[in-house]
Amino acid sequence: MPRRATGFTLLELLVVVAIVAIASAGVAFSLQDASRTRLDREAQRLAALLESGRAQSRASGVPMRWRVTPQGFVFDGSAAGTTALPTAWQHPETQAHSSAPVVLGPEPLIGAQQVRLWLQDTPTRSLWVATDGLRPFSVQNTAP
């Protein structure tokens, strides 16, 4: 009785290698740069906070300003009884720059304003949170 050869055929090995290659490519594309994700989240959060401050200012009729501080940022002029807004970045390495304090109301139309955000470890990549004064604050990849 002849012995059957044991082991894998070349075709079986090629199929396994192809499956591993496809799986590893999928994992590589699904992983994002951590600093990019942090900056994107921080910019989206700031846009939401500025819109919240704008809504509070319009509802109370009291002017509100947002400005950068060494510890993070602050909302000035909030009316008594309104919800307190955060004053710190979620990620301590976040940096921001605005040429002037961002005025959030109480008028429905405000001037065009922008804030530049970046991370300390990647200062060359920036995002801008900006408004033209009529539309809500939004995140932009290039300077407005």
Image: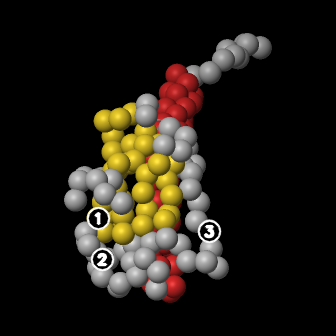
Query: Which residue position holds label 2?
Result: 110
Outermost left residue? 144
Q: Earlier in the sequence, mark 3 or mark 2?
A: 3
Q: Marks 3 and 2, how far apart in space?
A: 22 Å
Q: Marks 3 and 1, how far apart in space?
A: 22 Å
In the image, is residue 57 above or below residue 93? below
Element on which disc 2 rests: loop
**Residue 55 percent across, percent down from the top left:** 48, 80
Residue at x 33% of width, y 40% of height:
125
Q: Which mark is residue 62?
A: none
From this viewpoint, is residue 11 visible? no
**Residue 92 percent across, percent down from the top left:** 55, 40
In the image, is residue 57 above or below residue 144? below
Q: Residues within 10 Å of mark 1 (few under 14, many from 20)?
A: some
Q: Marks 2 and 1, how far apart in space?
A: 8 Å
Residue at x 33% of width, y 53% of height:
98
Q: Amino acid at mark 1?
A: Gln
**Residue 94 percent across, percent down from the top left:** 47, 43
Q: Amino acid at mark 2?
A: Ile
**Residue 15 percent across, percent down from the top left:** 53, 32
Along the viewing direction, whichever of 84 and 30 lies nearer the viewer: 84
Q: Dots 3 and 2: beta carbons under 8 Å?
A: no
Along the viewing direction, whichever of 121 and 62 lies nearer the viewer: 62
Q: Dots 2 and 1: beta carbons under 8 Å?
A: yes
Element on which disc 3 rests: loop
Query: Which residue position holds label 1?
Result: 113
Query: Which residue position holds label 3?
Result: 84
Q: Looking at the figure, which quarter contains the C terminus?
A: bottom left
